[in-house]
Image (tube, rainbow, N blue to C red):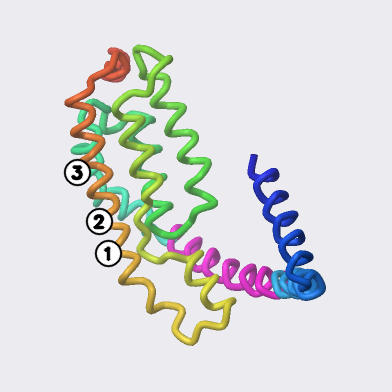
Amino acid sequence: MINYIWGWMILLSLVVGALNGRLEYTVNEGINAAKNSITVVLSFAGIMCMWSGIMKIADDGGISSFIGKLLSPITHFLFPRLKKTGPAMRTIIMNITANLLGMGNAATPLGLKAMGELDKLSANREYATDEMCTFVVLNTASFQLIPTTIIALRAAAGSEKPFEIIVPIWLASGFAILCALVSVKLLSKLCPVPSSKIISRNDK
């Protein structure tokens, strides 16, 4: 679908440019944008490699385990029916920790694994459980202590102060997560579905 959308946008821009007698300018700008994108991507790649390395060092230094312990009371509150030491809870904590540290590449496979573990505990696999919905919301909002991607993009675009966006991102992400979690919890109470059950082997 996205390919069709981009295709029609490009075609429309060419048609409008031709009708306005500015087709040459439209084509030239497209070529210049393609050239600039290579420069931005290379700059972005270098910055991302640097921050990924820093986060990897922090992870190997035990920060992930420390954050995981701090998150335990919060995750137990959000997922009260999940066993604290169960595979689903462990994977969820690992996913949240990876997102906090800005390790998006590591968070994605952990998120998929967490959903797989939650699916195993579902009493009705035709529906998403409350735990699945809560986790999707939490993972999508993904509060980050260091928003590596945005910082890298700003630096690659020539920003003199790429880090000044951190506090606004914290505030926006915090409010987004709060609103999303409140909505999920309210909807789970107001609109219960058969998927809300967790099968008994979760307690083993």
Q: State which mark lies toward you, 2 or 3.
A: 2
Task: Tell me which amino acid carries mark 3.
Answer: Pro
Which residue in the protein does label 2 denote? 175
Q: Which residue is mark 3?
A: 73
Residues in magenta, as a range: 38-60
* Residue 7 horizontal/vertical position (percent): 72, 49
Q: Nearer the viewer, residue 12 or 97?
A: 12
Q: Are marks 2 and 1 in contact (CB under 8 Å)?
A: yes
Please tell me whether residue 162 is drawn above or below residue 184 in the rendered image: below
Q: In percent of the image, x 42 and y 15: which residue is there?
A: 125
Secondary element at image label 2: helix
155 sits to left or right of 204: right
Which sits in the foreground, 140 or 52? 140
Is residue 87 found left or right of 130 in the rendered image?
right
The amino acid type, in three-letter code, at marker 2 is: Phe
Disc 2/disc 1 C-alpha distance (Å): 6 Å
Tell me the residue that label 1 is attached to: 171
Q: CA distance from mark 2 to mark 3?
A: 20 Å
**Element under disc 1:** helix
Q: Where is residue 95 shown, x and y percent of the image? A: 41, 45
Q: Is residue 43 magenta?
A: yes
Tag 1 and tag 3, C-beta contact below 8 Å = no
Which quadrant of the figure contains the N terminus? top right
Q: Residue at x 34, y 44 (%)?
A: 138
Residue at 76 percent of width and 61 percent of height = 14
Residue 63 shown in magenta: no
